[in-house]
Image: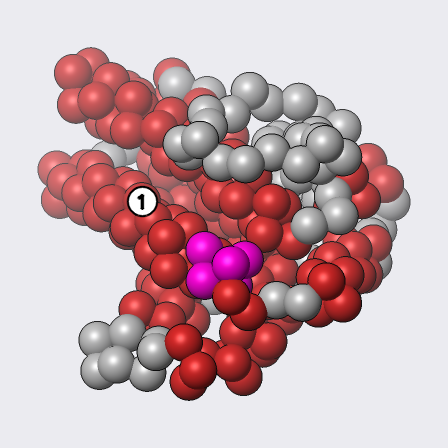
Amino acid sequence: MTHLPDPNKYSDPIRYFRDSHALIITLINQLDDLIKSAEQKGIKKSIIEDKAWREILEFLVNVAPIHEQDEEMALFPLVFKKVPHVGFQMANSPIRFIHEQHEVMQMHSIELLQIWKQTLIKNELTDEEANRFILGAKQLAAIYREHVRTENEIIYTTANDELLSPQERESIMNTIREHHGAEVITPYFDYEAPVISNPAYSPKVVVGDDENDAISGEELEVEEEGDEEETGDDEMRY
């Protein structure tokens, strides 16, 4: 399973958040490729045969929300306090919709998981379900791209250039490390379990052993998001 970067390898939170976004976009690019393949070979056939669906959906349902929690716990409280001083309070300010977008992305991801899992269990997929699955996947990819772009260009850039003091950067990283250091784990899918039917379902993390730790040494090559400035001690490890 693909994991987020290890926060213990970072001293700067904006670098950490940007690298997390680079990883997310890498998975979204893989999702785009999978969508194209499914449209060519057949959606049911793709769901049953293409193992990448499990990897991507597992990441989007169980791992990506940890990144969003990092933002909401560590970064956003500081940004929101200072936002009036940098002109974020316009009527169409994107920062107003960040929390809502997190919820929308999670709901889309869970719906895809429902259809994917049901197809594997029943070995059948109606035309309506196939259309809903492929359109939902396209919408999710588009939402993620716009969401990441907004956070990178508006929130992260402003926070990095204008808002955060060295002490605040250290405090943010400490909060992130504490969040990840609590040995939160993400459960693997149970293929025999009932299909999730509650649209408000939110995956829970539980304390357990280190085998399924949300922070891992597993490496995944990610695609860079432009010419971001690198810091010498901020290595990526996934």
| Residue 84 is one of the magenta-drawn residues | no
Residue nearest the observer in this picture, 71 or 227: 227
Segment colored magenta: 157-161
Residue 174 lies left or right of residue 104; in this view the side is right
Residue 146 shown left or right of residue 14 in the figure: left
Q: How many marks?
A: 1
Q: Does 222 sit above or below residue 147?
A: above
Q: Locate residue 103, reporting x and y percent.
A: 40, 66
Closer-to-camera residue (215/168): 168
Residue at image coords 62%, 60% = 70
Image point 16% across, 16% down: which residue? 40
Q: Position of residue 80 (x, y in %)?
A: 50, 79
Colouring mode (rainbow / by chain / secondary structure / one colour):
secondary structure
Q: Is residue 219 above or below residue 109?
A: above
- Residue visible at 44% across and 31% down in the picture: 227
Question: Which residue does the numbered mark 1 point to in the structure image?
Answer: 145
Q: Who is closer to the viewer here, 43 or 216?
A: 216
Residue at disc 1, secondary structure: helix
| Residue at 53%, 49% in the rendered image | 64
Q: Does the image show residue 98?
A: yes
- Residue 154 position (above or below residue 76): above
In which quadrant of the rendered image does the N terminus lie? top right
Looking at this view, name the residue that lies furthest to the right.
209
Task: Say left or right for 155 vs 44.
Answer: right
Give the percent coordinates (x, y) of residue 145.
31, 44
The residue under label 1 is which amino acid type?
A: Arg
Magenta segment includes 159? yes
Image quadrant assignment for residue 234: top right
Measured as percent of width and height from the top left, residue 201 is found at: 47, 66
Label 1 crowd (10 A; few <14 / some 14-19 / many >=20): some
Report whether residue 133 is seen.
Answer: no
